[in-house]
Amino acid sequence: MLRGLMMDQPLLISSLLTHAAQNHGDTEIVSRTVEGPGKDGKGALHRYTYAQAEARARKLAQALSRLGVKAGDRVGTFAWNGYRHFELYFGVSGMGAVIHTVNPRLFPEQLTYIVDHAEDAYVFFDLTFAPLMEKLAPACRAVKGWVAMTDRIHMPQISVPNLLCYEELIAPESGRYEWPLLDENSASGLCYSSGTTGAPKGVLFAHRSTVLHAYASSLPDVFNCSARSAILPVVPMFHVNAWGVPYMATLNGAKLVLPGAGLDGKSLYELFEAEGVTTTAGVPTVWLGLLAFMRENKLKFSTLKTAVVGGSACPPAMITEFRDAHGVDCQHAWGMTEMSPLGTLCTLKGKHLALPQDKQFEIQVKQGRAICGVEMKIVDGEGRDLPRDGKAFGDLMVRGPWVLREYFKGEGGDPLREGWFPTGDVATIDADGYMQITDRSKDVIKSGGEWISSIELENIAVAHPGIAEAAVIGVPHPKWDERPLVVAVRKQGANVAREDMLEFYKGKVAKWWIPDDVTFVDQLPHTATGKLLKTKLRQDFKDHEWPAA
Ligand code: AMP
């Protein structure tokens, strides 16, 4: 082999922040805090720059060393999107330890399992989660200290062993600290997959995979991130690193706006407007809330250009509302924790620009094209490749440098099939490379030996003007094995009836796809990451009585 003669410089997370501090030193990071109200009655806004963030991340790294945290040790966080969490992202990974972002919305038993399994040496938490820490602490005996992410005057009165104060922890440090030159394959972050079934499993990111993912997500056909962007991740920093946005913003020197706990429509809208946000990202449920608030109050966005929507299927009606009411490009994205998480994003190609809007829309509702670095294929039940014709659907397999090879501590054995990671999603891929998820493999409705896509039926339900949210599940049926049942939430003031809904499906799907029944509920159950909790719905409706044919 003739080796290339380029420098062997590792790809490190610390280098992203050093770059931002040197080249975008005065670019702002704005955060809504959780420590008492600001002038508007909500969490006060904190603002500082990349240069200041880097200086504090270095002090944090020194403080962690002083506490005895070593390379490879895990440091847990229970925190919103905010500047101290940002410092932990870089300070913990930068010094060689592993930041373990915990999703506080999980059940307490899952949380103690996760903290225990990860063997977190220290746990950092926002004040919101102080009562939760008190509840978890007795069962998390390996944790050496619990650090409240606040200053002395806001310290919570809780009883946990070795309660520390973040600001006091970093205050005595000099900040004269050189980021260590780590192996780029060393672990940087840990995140447990949402665990809708079975015990949650740890996905262990590396410096290399994280930096490559940050480069790839910046691309024009992905987040189109630059030093002119102001980006607000609504997706929490405890859900697959806010889809990598904090790393990507830092790599580009983009202004970063962190919404804290204020995820309701009003708080978000005000922050978007006040900070001139151009780009945002989050799951469909948050946009349902924000768009409804804007509709009710006749509000418009003045700076927002792009909203990336993923985590679950983006209802087509959301794409049109963003476009027609607000002139915002709503881009559908797909990924998973095991993929750091980005796999695809949906943007048009040059040849599509001359198409009429309805034809463009047929493309935009898909989950999108693979981001270079991610390879995708679909296979049948025997593992044979299926054609990329936009029609055949099968199990979606992926591979790439930011895709998981193995779960933390080997949990669950070897997850790969001949070098490919089976996503558990069922999809089509068309000749242009656009992938469309038709279902989660366990959610697909099996009727008379054929498959019906629950996502497609849900998309139609929420396109009805009287429906706020809907889930479609397969319910046991004496003749067809399973038939689709719509479980829907009406919009406020709407009185849409079962018959209206069934009528609404006519002409939109094959006759045998039309659901057999509709039932209305006040709200739908969601997982800790905002996905519809269909396992619960299937349980709740397993004895559903079908109307007489
Ligand atoms: P998580 O690891 O919690 O991010 O969950 C990953 C799973 O969420 C994927 O395997 C999909 O089933 C689902 N998912 C993510 N994005 C989308 C999307 N745009 N459309 C449909 N399902 C999605």
Image (cartoon, rainbow, N blue to C red):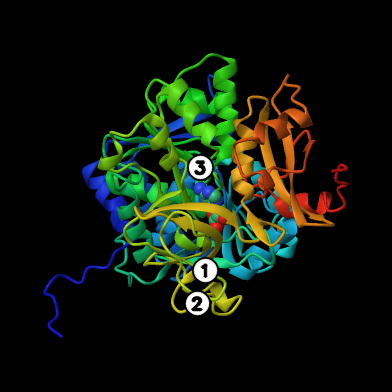
Q: Is residue 5 left or right of residue 483?
A: left
Real-space CA distance between mark 3 and mark 2, rounded to the nearest whole angstrom: 36 Å
**189 or 439: which is nearer to us?**
439
Residue occupied by mark 3: 81
Between marks 3 and 2 in the image, the one whose residue lies nearer the viewer: 2
Q: Is residue 101 left or right of residue 197?
A: left
Q: Is residue 413 left or right of residue 227?
A: right
538 lies above or below 34 = below
Q: Do tag 1 and tag 2 residues touch (Cβ < 8 Å)? A: yes
> In this view, which residue lies farthest toward the bottom?
1
Residue occupied by mark 2: 417
Counting residues from the N terminus, which is met first, the one under dot 3 or under dot 2?
3
At 25% across and 41% down in the image, what residue appears? 350
At 49% across and 22% down in the image, what residue appears? 270
**30 or 526: which is nearer to us?**
526
Real-space CA distance between mark 1 and mark 3, rounded to the nearest whole angstrom: 31 Å
Q: Do tag 3 and tag 2 residues touch (Cβ < 8 Å)? A: no
The yes-or-no answer for disc 3 within 8 Å of ligand 1 is: no
Q: What is the crowding at mark 3: few (fewer than 14 residues within 10 Å), some, or many (at least 20)?
A: many
**51 or 112: which is nearer to us?**
112
Q: Which amino acid type corresponds to the residue marked 1 in the rendered image?
A: Pro
Q: Which amino acid type corresponds to the residue marked 2 in the rendered image?
A: Arg
Residue occupied by mark 1: 422
**138 or 486: which is nearer to us?**
486
Q: Do tag 1 and tag 3 residues touch (Cβ < 8 Å)? A: no
Q: Which amino acid type corresponds to the residue marked 3 in the rendered image?
A: Asn
214 lies above or below 283 = below
